[in-house]
Image (cartoon, rainbow, N blue to C red):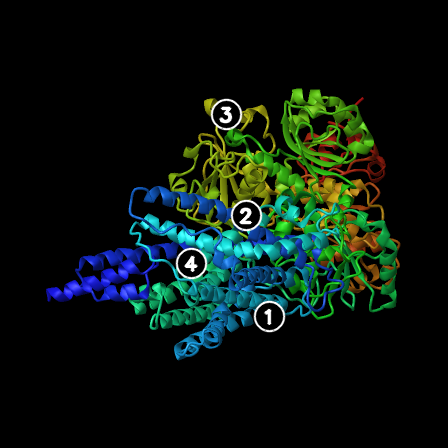
Amino acid sequence: RRSITTQQTLIYQIFYHTIPYRPTYLQFKAASTLPRKHPMKKANSSLAAVPVLICTCYTACWYYTSSKNAVATQRLVQEYEYKGAIASVSSPPTGFQFAHFPEMMVLTALQLLTGLCISWPIHCLLSSQVKVQTAGTAPSPSPSPLLSPVTWKTSTGIAVGILHFIGCLCTNMGFALGSASVVQVVKLLEPIETMMLIALTNVVILKMGAGHGITVTKALSVLIIVSGTAMLLIQKSAGTGVLEDATDDETSINNTNTNTNNPVNYQSVLFALCSGFAMASRNVVKKISLSKVVAAPAPPSRSITQVWIQSTLKGLSNYFSITAVAAVPATLCFLLAEIIGSSSPQINDNNMLISAWMLTSKSVGSVGKEAIVFHGLYNLSSISVLGLISAQSHSILNVGKRIVNVLIASIAFQEPIGVFGIIGLFIAAVGGMLYSFEGSNGNGNLFTVLLGQINLRRSFCSACIGLIVSVQLLSGMNLNGYQLPSIYDNVYYGSTVPSSIIQKNNGKYAVWMFPFPPPARTSNEIIALLAQEDNEEETALTLICAYSNACKAFEGHTKINLRDLTQGTYYHNYVRDQAYHKVRHMNDFPYHIQAIAMLGLLLNEEGENVCVRTLGGRTEFCDVEAFSSYDPYEGNELNATNFPFELFNDGPVSEENNSLSLAPRVMLTTEKFAMWGVEDIPKSMCKHFNSGEDVQSYAGAAWLPFISEIRDKLNALRNYNGYYIGNALMAQNPFNTTDADYTYENMKKITLASIYSTEPGIKGMEGYIRNYTNSVGPFGCRSTLTDGILKARKIKSYFSACLTLTTDMQGAILSNEGYSKSTYIKNDILKPNATKLPSPEQKTKIIFIDVVDQEAVPRSVRDSKDAIYMAANVEPWYPNCEEKMGRYSYSYKLLSTYANQAKVVITSRIHAGLPAVGLGIPVIFVENSGAREQWLPGGKQSVGRVEGLLDVFHRVQRGVDGKNWTFGNLTGDVPHSDGVHLADRYRASFWNRLKKTHYYRDSAKMFGMVPFQRLGRKNIEIGIQDTFHFVLESDLTWQTKRAIEHVFYFHPNCKVYVHSNDISPNELETFTEAGFNLVVQAYDLDLLHEEELHVPHKLRNNDFQRASLPLLLLRKLGGIYLSKETLVLKTIAAGIEEGVVLQENGDIAMAYHSRQSKDVVKSLTYMTKSRSMVENSGNLTWSFPVLSNLDTLKCIEDIKWGLDDDTKDKIAVSLHPSSFASIKTIKIDTECYKIIEKLCIFCDEIHWDYNE
């Protein structure tokens, strides 16, 4: 028994000490004969662990760097395409495309040369380490030379290098012509190529008697790999339905494929196959060359560190030698490509070298460097692994690498794999494992023998389960907003576009969403095309134009409501939250809107003949799928969004206009549109930065076509000649201005809509304000305090409230990654496809924002599971709080949380409460007083900052009657405060003022901001009148509008009929745009007589026929009739008596009758007999004063005159028709000023003046 053990030991030592460094199958076979507890058995186990560890580390590095290289190369290609390297879609290429060859040859050469530069210093460093570690010890193997003679002195070595160059170039060309994931899918076929080459080598070159070496298991495994790969390619080629599968970047972005319905570019597939064949040939030829070299015996290195270094040195030597040979043809191609590729203005107008563009261009960023550096690293890792295992095993690892790369590329480029693709990946993985297991049964190698030392069955099952879980998780990452869905998601497929568009029979649209006219050179062609509409020619265009100013030269253009058009599409949120995206994209914003409008038309139209083009363009686009990779939410620069530049081109263009020839950037300098704000701030200021500042900026930005610059608040008007909406807290600080700012041309572009300022601030800018109010319009005051100060100085002003009441955002969904209720703001902003927006019933959160007196809120509410605590000031720990978009994302998250999560907002900050009211969220405003009154940023409530604003909220204050908490535990619905009716009036006034600037009017209509949805529409008061009537002729004056305003002032949810055969609905559209229910309708007096009374002809021909019209209307519809001189002064109860109040001239001032009232018949019969209208005002409880001519004049001009005390509580007052109609202005503080101008909705229209 002892002699056998000694013999075993001797056999093992012979093999162990005489065979060269790399352990082989024979060494481990010898070790397998040792008893389990033999000392040499333990030594062998340690030796086995070292190569496994080395191989695993190198493989992990190989996988990571390969994925990084593929993604970076693909993105570099996209940037090159955006710069105009690919021909325009107006003339799609046929056959092979060579436009990418110069770029890819330069990239390949730089990759190989950089790889040499990386490997040389590493080899020198490790070689020196070997000498240090072996000093004074037993001899160890000499470091492998950096440039192996086997490579550069033999034909096979040179062949390996050339094949390596061809393989790299073909891989890059595959990336250039197709998506990264498709290239990786095709290269899954590399084991087939390797197996065929090995079989051919065994039979033809090595002439092995054993035959070709292809077993049944190998053939079966290869068949399985092919099946899985085919399924993946079929999945990529499907491109149907809702675009569940990814589309090729080349197809979707540039539409250069001749078959636009097929996202797989088969030129890319061909190059990928060539790359795989070249790489497989390289591996086989390299093994042949190594098999001819006999390594000198050397003692083993038992140190793990030494083994690692020796393996690394060998890999470096292999890589450097192969790459050095490959770099020779690569350098020649590099020089040729730079000459060819840089001779045209495809990179820029200065003929910049392609290599310089890759490394230094700001538009490329880091992707050029990554594509170059990671290529060398991944090839270094790959060849190092090849030095440890066989070519066949290396190909199997390649299968795993390709699968990982497919997953990474699908995520990076937002290409869903789909269920069919997942199955294909799984099948390919199974085939690869079977191929590997087959290798372990033959005259194997180190890698397969080591695999044989573990439980193969358990390994196989674990790997399959891991692959399935990984793929499912990665494919499902769109749930967290990382994967771009189809723009078909949730699309409403109606038979026509929204009613705001006049649809032509041929479905051809020219679109222009820019605020300025198109380039003059295109005008004649456009006019000619539009003129064909009358003849109904096939080429006729329907012109859709967002801005009236931009299309004045083109008759018959129609406008478009983008909110309606994009409803149900991926782009809808971009339109709804346009204020936020204007800040993100600045001057690029109009280009996104143009693209979204064109794609929205393609999505909403039904039929195959719908095509769109940019106004002035000759190329039309009819396939929306070609632009499915466009994602305006992805980045802040056009290039980062996969922007469809081809929509703006009619052929190759230069860098001068940034590939936007149909809408050059210089066009956007026609006018300036600024909002106030700040750019980056010191990190230390984050805690002191009030997000309310940005919320106010959003409110102004929403009305602008785009934002060309962000100006400092105090210097917003200084040396500025563009458009600006003033909505800010100035306090004691005045606007800084120069003499040039006083010109009317500059001031008319400024809208001072909502400013809070104190005495020092107004004094500092009084000269500018006086000039402004005298020539442009009144000063809108955010506080009644400011309004009072200005009126004391006899400067025209009005209380406007705050523009943030017009906040209108859909908001984003936040990731909800498990942060505590006090750090909820740290959640990420998700893309619109991440999850559905919550329904009103799902908005259950109670949002606390800086509540000054927590004890005023019940503890059960404060501790509710639905409570979320947020702060108006940007927290220092908030990511990137010092950067502009870091801060604006903070305020956007606040607004998004209100819009999508809030059941109620509880706060002590007005710019948390006001935008929440604007979004339709009930707000409970908590106040305090006394010693703890310091609760508003910048001062106490008593200083007047919020005078007039708090009335739109529910107000709570401990110890104050009328402000007690009356909302229970907030478990049910929280009603709005009646103050929302005030908010509706303020919003209407803002709209009435802003719409006078055509840019703001057109922007609001395009983005669907108007008509407003009234906030108080659900606060319906029971028991009051709800129907009113006016009969008007063509004399629609401001006095008439004020009469209508008074009705809505006291009856905001009522319906007002304006009966007129002369007035169009457009003349009173401001009311409907503000959300009020006003209907303009024509009437037929004869028909009314016949329908309502069946009266004889003698009445119809009576001189008082027209006087009967109001009564006939009341009999038919019921309600209250008012003359245009009668002003309602209070809410009118529903149960008043029927009756009539007449004016001095006998016309009706006010009448009330129910439907089908018999009193109407009595009144009309009396009219027939007495030839006059009967009045019963003396018997009415609701009678009101009717002023004479003299009293009306006194009411208008005499501040000492007033209504009698017994008439002040009446429901209305009627002014003398001729006196009221003749006035131009009313003196301030007169009775009529209080009646007419204080009880207004459109208070921005001032019809009063100061007393002399």
| Amino acid at dot 2 | Ala
Closest to the observer, 722 or 1025: 722
* Residue 385, label in figure: 4
**What residue does disc 3 label?**
934
- For the residues labelled 3 and 2, the Cα–Cα distance comes to 29 Å
Nearer mark to the viewer, of 1 and 2: 1
Q: Earlier in the sequence, mark 1 or mark 2?
A: 1
Q: Earlier in the sequence, mark 1 or mark 3?
A: 1
Residue 1019, above or below 618: above
SS type, badge 3 = loop
Nearer mark to the viewer, of 4 and 3: 4
**What residue does disc 2 label?**
899
**What residue does disc 1 label?**
240
- For the residues labelled 1 and 3, the Cα–Cα distance comes to 62 Å
> What residue do we see at 58% from left, 71% from top?
238
Closest to the observer, 460 or 127: 127
| Amino acid at dot 3 | Gln
Q: Quadrant of the C terminus?
A: top right
